[in-house]
Amino acid sequence: MLAGLVHTPIARALSWALIHFLWEGAAVAALLGAALFVFRPASARVRYGLACVALCAMLAAPAVTLAILWPRIQMDAGVVIRSGAPPAAHVPAPSAPGPPPALPPDRLAWVAPLWMAGVLIFYMRTAASWAAAERLRRRGTIVASADWQDKLRALARRLRVSRPVTMLESCLAETPAVVGYLRPAILIPAGLLTGLAPEQVEAILLHELEHIRRHDYAVNVLQTLVEGLLFYHPAVWWVSGVIRAERENCCDDAVVALVGDARGYAAALAELEWRRSVGRPALAARGGNLVLRIRRLLEPQGPRSIAGPALGATLLMASIAAGLMAWQPAAPSTAIPGGIVQEPAPPAQSGERTAREELRAQLERPYQGWLAKSLAVQEAQIATPYEKWLAEDVVYIITPDEKAAFQRLQTDAEREQFIEQFWLRRDPTPGTVENEFKEEHYRRIAYANEHFTEGIIPGWKSHRGMYYIKFGPPDEIDDHRDSRPPFVAWTYHRMQPALLGAGEATVVFTDVDGSGRFVLPAHTPASAIIMGSPPRVDLRNQTATVTFNVPSFGGPTAVYIRIQSQPGGKVVEAREEASAPQYSKSFQLHLGSYSIQVFVQRPGEGVIALFPRGEGFGFIAVGHIEGHATEREQAPAADAAAVAAAVAGSAAREQSGANADEHIARVPTSDLDVTVGIKTLERKPPDPSRDVVITVEAPGASGKVEIHGEITTMAGRTVNVFAEGAVGNPYPRTIPLNPGRYRLKVLVRDPMDGRVGTRLKDFDVQP
Amino acid sequence: MPEMHEPPRPTDAELEILTVLWARGPSTVREVHSAIAQRKPTLYTTVLKMLQIMAEKSLVRRDERQRAHVYRASQPREWTQRQLAGDLLRRAFGGSASSLVLGALSASKATPEELAEIRRMIEKHEKGE
């Protein structure tokens, strides 16, 4: 019965169409190979498009062939279509009249049913894959935390992905992946969110979102269906492989364009692969394509190995076609695409050189690293003068609320109005025509562009420019360009707007790699220095002893201590190597007020302030050592030490905080009583965290006060830092905290007379 | 000792709880509950009961030193993947979702040689060559 079906004209036509596809597919693949070779430097998007067109052509080819053959076969009613076909030798001459010859037991006719069986197997496999993918979405997954969902939404907006995307943590997914088309979900292996750096997770999320934006999931399903339909042709698998590879390249390019840090992204991908392979490396020898992708990321114009597979595929196709023709001599002679075969060109030397130059140019950007990405993104998206105003002119001074409001505006008239209001709000003399604030702001931008331009980076975008525009000219500049590595320290006596409460801050810009660009310490890899404990200063017999734990770098650490009598007097310095875990140095000092700065330098790297505070700024708190001869003589040494500790500006971070707190209470002149009230408010269930209202009050202060605060866990991990200049007294602050035990340290300073008080308090947040 | 023999294959609901523990680390019942309740309404007591059952099955371990008991998964995450690899469909078709899902990494893992190569490339560029 099957034989009856097999020998219908449609089955024969189909068989022939499938056989013809052997050379048709080879020809399309060869054309694609040639096109990819010619378009070697083209973008991944172009190459992806070419491969997609090739796959469509492969799908169309047998359909067209079938459409041409079927009527002819029906007409010929069983006459072997190609007169020269070998089976013809066994049948009567085709031209012979008479009853339609019983079809020979033509082996060719079995091609169609065998093909159908193959397609069936492949489609069952696809269905199983689909079911598995759907199960992956449902089984062993939990919704990622609200923080991450928010972040994902922000990233999706940035990529202009309109569909809602969920982020699931999965215990079954081995690598981050996108599942589903209409309701896409991004699966993240459980534990990865806490295991990778947030910037790395963000880059991976951007990659996945780009897949969603490009509708890759749907394309991939269609592609899998085509593969199943034409499964027997290696050229189809090769073209499909090119599509998959270029698709990843497209997404990689999109990520790099957004975050502007190819190296960081490559490292994130590598980190991901290492995690997946830990203990269980690939069994298959063929491995993945990650080496190629990372090479492509790091060497943007480097040689691509596309010619190799293209050549291989072409040769394969050619040999198949040749074999087919030997058996079927009448097959069209164009089957041998020999003329198109190209020798893979040797990797061009000049090409390699430009790759390296490009890489160097990339590395020379001072905003290497993730912290720069916001600027890079803004740069990429600037189109209208209003966007430029937002992203360049006022980027450092606009508040988040203002920014959000501006972005909501619809018409240019509204935007003009907003900009006018923006400056008006800041005008110190609203009645006059001049807006001093605006003039000063644009003067600072011009000054920054003139003095801080570093290579291709305009001055306003350099780190020093950023500070100059935001905080104005520093009161002091310490030039250490001759040290190694060179650094420049800017000191503000009174930073406006005050980021650190006290307003006094030193910012260190270091030329980390000798490239002539001075960057903030937080941008150096050694930001781990925050682990180091702040220095303590002990005053006995007119000797100041500076003691602190040296952060362990596994080598000698250079320490630079600078003590200056206040206001702006003599400087005492010490510069030496510290190898012991604890560093201690004594200075003979006359009575008076001093400021102290401690710099630590990891060998071969940047200079790092010992207590960087605030996010990514790297300030050094500048403190005072004060003492009065009469008191010193009468009071026990501990009191004098307490004065120093209390006012060192770091008392809030002092490890022996409890002691410092105790001593301060006994120092008469610089004392400011501080009380702290703590109230816990429940949040809406099931949210387990609590809103903790902290009320800081200094009853003895003369008016507004400056407040530093820090909340740590009992293990010493900082969970919240706040610093406010000129706030009301008492000052309430609400901080969300998870249940647990915490330690609060606050330092209050009265700006009128410089008195300082601290308070340390342990408290519980009940579950 | 219950730790001596391998725990049974987790059910889907148990798997969800295990995922919370793998993703967030050792957690209290309240933390597990709040993570799961984000997607579907679940009673606190249900989660508590399940965690107790899972502790009996030695799928999780309970730390009773603190006032609020802290649970943690007794097996690493990879263990479940081996456990569930025995699914019929997987065995029949030798395939998995990997051909349809799109990931940042390809479905096939890198070989140790490739990993070494990747490490070398990144280190080279870190030096700024």
Image (cartoon, coloured by chain):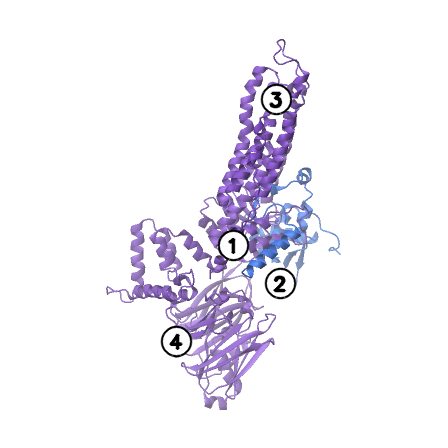
The answer to whether B112 is drawn above or below residue A515 in the figure is above
How far apart, in angstroms, are the residues tagged by discs 3 and 4? Answer: 94 Å
| Residue underneath mark 2 | B67
Within 10 angstroms of label 4, few (less than 14), some, or many (20 or more) residues?
some
How far apart, in angstroms, are the residues tagged by discs 3 and 1? Answer: 57 Å
The answer to whether marks 3 and 4 mark residues whose Cβ atoms lie closer than 8 Å is no
Check disc 1 and give the amino acid type.
Answer: Arg
The answer to whether marks 2 and 3 mark residues whose Cβ atoms lie closer than 8 Å is no
Q: Chain of mark 4?
A: A
Within 10 angstroms of label 3, few (less than 14), some, or many (20 or more) residues?
some
| N-term mark: 3 or 1 | 3
Q: Nearer the viewer, mark 4 or mark 1?
A: 1
Q: Which chain is blue?
A: B
| Residue underneath mark 1 | A353
How far apart, in angstroms, are the residues tagged by discs 2 and 3? Answer: 75 Å
Element class at badge 2:
loop
Check disc 2 and give the amino acid type.
Answer: Arg
How far apart, in angstroms, are the residues tagged by discs 4 and 2? Answer: 45 Å
Residue A402 in the image, given as x and y percentages of width and height: 36, 57
| Residue underneath mark 3 | A11
Residue furthest to the top:
A98
| N-term mark: 4 or 1 | 1
Q: Nearer the viewer, mark 3 or mark 4?
A: 3
Instruction: Give the colour of chain A.
Output: purple
| Quadrant in the rendering for residue A121 | top right
Residue at screen point 64% across, 25% down? A111
Residue B76 in the image, given as x and y percentages of width and height: 66, 54
Q: Nearer the viewer, mark 2 or mark 3?
A: 3
Foreground pick, B33 / A727: A727
Left or right: where A520 falls relative to A345: left
Residue A117 in the image, given as x and y percentages of width and height: 65, 29
Q: Which mark is residue A751?
A: 4
